[in-house]
Amino acid sequence: MNMNMITASKTDLVTLYWDRLDGDGWSLYAAATAQGLGYVGSHDGSFDELEAWAAQRYPNHEWVRDEVTMLPYLTEIAEYLQGTREEFTIPMDDRGTPFQREVWQALCSIPYGQTTTYSEIAHQIGRPAAVRAVGAAIGANPVLIMVPCHRVIGKNGALTGYRGGLDMKQRLLALEAGQSIPVRGPHHAS
């Protein structure tokens, strides 16, 4: 055994703070670390969806439901969903690969109420041939709404895949356009 080799423990225990936003026709989980918001779930998503995210990124974690810690995050998300906020000021813990983080940063530059395409994002980050990889990075975005992957559409203008579901994507785009779309989902009447 090489005594100069330093072995790290699996990972240090990470506290994940969480809460659920319910109101104004929206219901979603959010979670944060001490560094910032790390996860925003899909509308009417389950805690299992949140747990799957945590298990992948933080194998050694503990859950703490903490309304006080989560209040600034959920307040800004609620303001956005009410149509009174266009930009976020809350910190984000955007754990991902360097490529994913580059794509997510490009997504954050898409102005409120506007859309772009996967190929435009690939060009923006200087990798025009990486359209599929850009799509995969967008699909891996753990912070829906705050990292506005809903603003990315197909080259032909069609709504394309979205982790939160196409109904949620359509509602977010309509919100930003100043329109209203009826709530759909298992907990709401159409």
Image: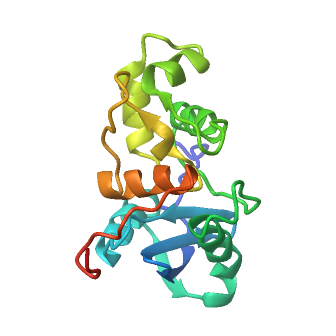
In the rendered view, tell whether residue 107 sits above or below residue 27.
above
Which residue extends farthest top? 129
Where residue 98 sits in the image (x, y, percent)? 57, 34
Which sits in the foreground, 182 or 99? 182
> What is the total number of numbered labels drawn onto the structure image?
0
In the rendered view, tell whether residue 48 sits above or below residue 94.
below
Where residue 87 sits in the image (x, y, percent)? 72, 54
In the rendered view, tell whether residue 12 sits above or below residue 162.
below
Identify which residue is drawn at 34% across, 77% down: 47
Where residue 180 sits in the image (x, y, percent)? 46, 62
Which residue extends farthest right? 89
Asked whether, in this view, residue 9 is left or right of residue 125, the answer is left
Identify which residue is drawn at 59% across, 55% down: 146
Q: Quadrant of the C terminus?
A: bottom left
In the rendered view, tell whether residue 95 sits above or below residue 67.
above
Identify which residue is drawn at 60% across, 70% down: 82
Which sits in the foreground, 26 or 50? 26
Which residue extends farthest front? 179
Where residue 188 sits in the image (x, y, percent)? 29, 80
